[in-house]
Amino acid sequence: MNGEQQAREQGLTDRVVASFDDAADPRLKEVMRSLTRHLHAFVRDVRLTEQEWRQAIDFLTATGHITDDRRQEFVLLSDVLGASMQVVTVNNEAYANATEATVFGPFFVDGSPLIEAGGDIAAGAPGEPCLVEGTVTDTAGNSVPGARIEVWEADADGFYDVQYGDDRTAARGHLVSDDDGGYRFWAVTPTPYPIPHDGPVGKLLEAAGRSPMRASHLHFLVRAPGLRTLVTHIFVRGDELLARDSVFGVRDSLILDFHPRAAGEVPPDGRDLGGRAWSRVRFDIVLAPDPGSVPAPDPGSVLAPDPGIVPAPAPGESPDGGRR
Ligand SMILES: [Fe+2]
């Protein structure tokens, strides 16, 4: 490319970046200037043709048209581009041995039933029984009693209860960790399911030769005072989808052994499983300190709080329609 061409392209980028210089909100200014630089760099990098630009506009238009109160194709797009997971990663900084976070997904329902220790969240959801147990601790290893543990999952047919079309509650619930930070419940062994792939995002996946399937998982949301809220899943070791989860939600540390147990083997709580095979998994949850709960230093101290540390948005605050 000759120097004159390069100068024209760079000059345009510079003028657009500078157009945000007077934005009253410094954060808006920072975000829009960076977005402009990256967007222009992308256009110049791939030498985007005018026809490709029109195709991109058509794609985004179709993404908008299929989106409504129940279907959020833009979130799905964010998911399959790994943008949702990158936002989770940026906002849940690695901290010592704290359990890693992953995508929240659209199927959490507030007000799930309280499950007593050792109770069953399945409530009739089809699937192989699975005994889930573990502890909640802080990063120093101290037990966290009274943590609120929300769990939810798809059934063996790949559906969440909110997709049943009736008002049933199944395969979801919440528990409270005991005095030693322990918890135990019955669920169903997680199985894979596809994100919706009948829209523009599905077409993109198809064109890219990518699968819409999500690796098998069980969702957790764990809250305790003074500790960082954890939104995560656990995954099933050996699942062939782990390496190509359609929304990039898998973390190695979240892949656990779901030990298969033969039909007829009596579980530790003596529960009658009607002669069915079952599985058993242990998930020890480690919560990071909540940056928002760190005591503020004295006024005037040089150790002013870092304005960059803000609590992660409460789960459910962002609309999200992709099946995850
Ligand atoms: Fe899910």
Image (cartoon, helix red, strand yellow):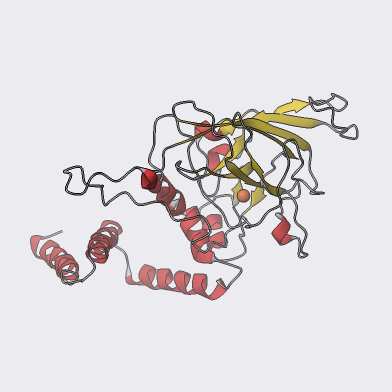
> Vertical placement of 69 versus 269: above or below?
below
Please indicate, yes or no, whether residue 216 appears anywhere in the rendered image.
no
> Vertical placement of 69 versus 316: above or below?
below
**Nearest to the observer: residue 53 or residue 279:** 279
- The image quadrant of residue 46 is bottom left
**Nearest to the observer: residue 260 or residue 150:** 150
Report x, y in % for residue 167: 76, 63
Q: Is residue 279 left or right of residue 103?
A: right
Which residue is located at x 46 percent, y 58 percent? 78
| Outermost residue toward the left in this view | 3
| Outermost residue toward the front in this view | 298
Which residue is located at x 66 percent, y 49 percent? 193
Q: How many marks?
A: 0
* Quadrant assignment for the N terminus: bottom left
Which residue is located at x 57 percent, y 62 percent? 321
**Nearest to the observer: residue 218 or residue 246:** 218
Q: Is residue 186 left or right of residue 59?
A: right
Q: Is residue 137 left or right of residue 310?
A: right
**Nearest to the observer: residue 297 or residue 138:** 297
Q: Is residue 83 left or right of residue 236?
A: left
Report x, y in % for residue 245: 55, 44
Report x, y in % for residue 160: 70, 54
> Vertical placement of 256 versus 172: above or below?
above
Report x, y in % for residue 7: 10, 64
| Outermost residue toward the right in this view | 274
Please indicate, yes or no, whether residue 322 appears anywhere in the rendered image.
yes
